[in-house]
Image: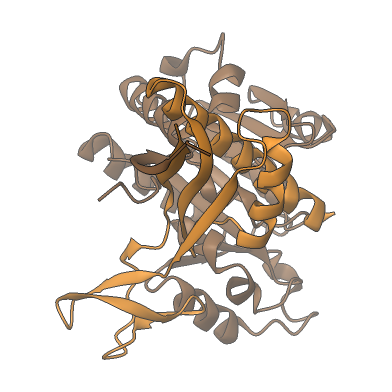
Amino acid sequence: MSSSTRMIEVRQNVLKQNDLVARALRQRFHDAGVFVVSMVSSPGAGKTALLERTLSLLRRQFRVAALVGDLATENDAARLARSQAPVKQIITGTVCHLEAAMVQSALEGWRLDDLDFLFIENVGNLVCPSSYDLGEDLRLVLMSVTEGEDKPLKYPTIFNSADVAVITKIDLASAVEFDAVAANCNIQAVRPRMTVLDVSAKSGEGMEEFLNFLQSRRSTARAQGVSPDPRALAAPD
Amino acid sequence: MLLCSVAMHELSIAMSIVELAQEEADRRGGVQIKAVYLRLGLLSGVVKEALLSSYEMACVDTPLQGSQLRIEEVPVQVFCRQCNAQRPVHSTQMFCCSECGTPTGEVVQGKELLVVGLEVEE
C-alpha cells in the first residue's frame, strides 16, 4: 500500500451549532428585556405543577409565557393554559432533551418585547439536558422530596450545569421522612454555594420566596447586561 | 426507558461528530478519515461507552465507515481560591480541591466535547 496516514489538528466543539444558536437567543432575550428561566428534573418531580402556579401568580404583575418540552404529549401545555398565559408545547419525538434550535423555532411568531418572563420546561430527564445551552438566564434543577436525598450525587453533571436547586413537594416532606440536611449537603457537595429553595406548588409553601427570588434575579440581570454563555462548554484552549 | 434515551443522546452526539469530521476532511481536499480524536470531559454529560457504540452506528453509509473514535477522557479540574491554582476535584460527587479540601464549584476543565484531531489517509 502506497498510501500514508498523517494527523490533522482540529479544534471543534461538537455542540458548536447548538452553542451558536443559544448565544443568538441569549442576545435576543436580552435585547427584548425578557428574563428566561429553564427547568430540568427527572420525570414527575413537579415541573409542570410549579410552573402552573408560578405563571398564575406572576402574571398578576408581569407578562409571562412558557415553552414546554415533552416526548409525546401536549398534556402539559393544556394544563399550563389554565393559567391564561401564552404557552407552547415542543414535542421532541425521540429526542430526550430540548436544543436551542427547538426553542428558536417554537418562538417564531412570538413578540419577545411583550414579555417579562419566559419559562422553558425541559423534557423530564436528568442526563441529556445538561449538555445543551438554551440561551436561558437561569437554569433551575428540581428535585422532589419523594425522590431521595442522594439525587445530586447520582446526577452531579446536571446539578453542576444548573444555577439553582429547587426542592419540590415540600408539603410531603415529613410524610416521606425527607432529610433536608442530607439533601442540602449532597447539593453543596456537587455544587458548592448553590442556592436551594423549598417549595410546594400544592400548598403554596415557599412560593412567595421563590417568586421574589425570580424577580430579584431578573432585576440583577437587567442591570448587568447579557451574560457571556454561562453554560457554554469549555472553550478550546 | 432512561437507558434508551441516554443511548439516543449519544447517537445524536455521534452523528454531530461524524458530520463535523467530514466537513473538516472535505475542507482539506477530501482525505479519508481513519480515526477521529475526541476530548471528552467527565462533566460533559456524555457516556464514553455509549458514544463508542453509537459512533459505529453513526458512521454506517458515510465516508467514515470503518473509522475509529479515539476518546481521551478529561478529568474535572476546578480553580481553588485557597491554593490560587487549578486543581483536580476530589470526585464528581465531592467538588472540593483535592489538595486542601476547600469546596469550589469553579469548573475550569471537564466539560469538553471537543474534536481535536483527525488521522487521515491520502
Viewer-nearest residue: B32 or A230: B32
Q: Position of residue A174 (x, y in %)?
A: 74, 81
In the picture provided, is A104 more to the left or to the right than B1? left
Above or below, A215 against A112 in this view is below
Residue at horizontal 52 percent and vertical 55 percent from the top = B70
Horizontal and vertical percent for residue A140?
Answer: 53, 53
Q: Is A16 situated above or below A155?
A: above
Across and down, in percent, residue B29 comes to 40, 20
Q: Position of residue A134 (x, y in %)?
A: 49, 36
Residue at 50% over, 45% down: B36
The vertical placement of B46 against A52, above or below, is below
Answer with left or right where residue B12 lies relative to residue A232: right
Residue A69, image quadrant: top right
In the depicted view, which residue is nearer to us: A232 or A58? A232
**Colour displayed for chain A in the image of the structure:** brown
Q: Nearer the viewer, residue B15 or A17?
A: B15
Chain rendered orange: B
Question: Which residue does the image show at 47% across and 51% down from the upper left?
Answer: B38
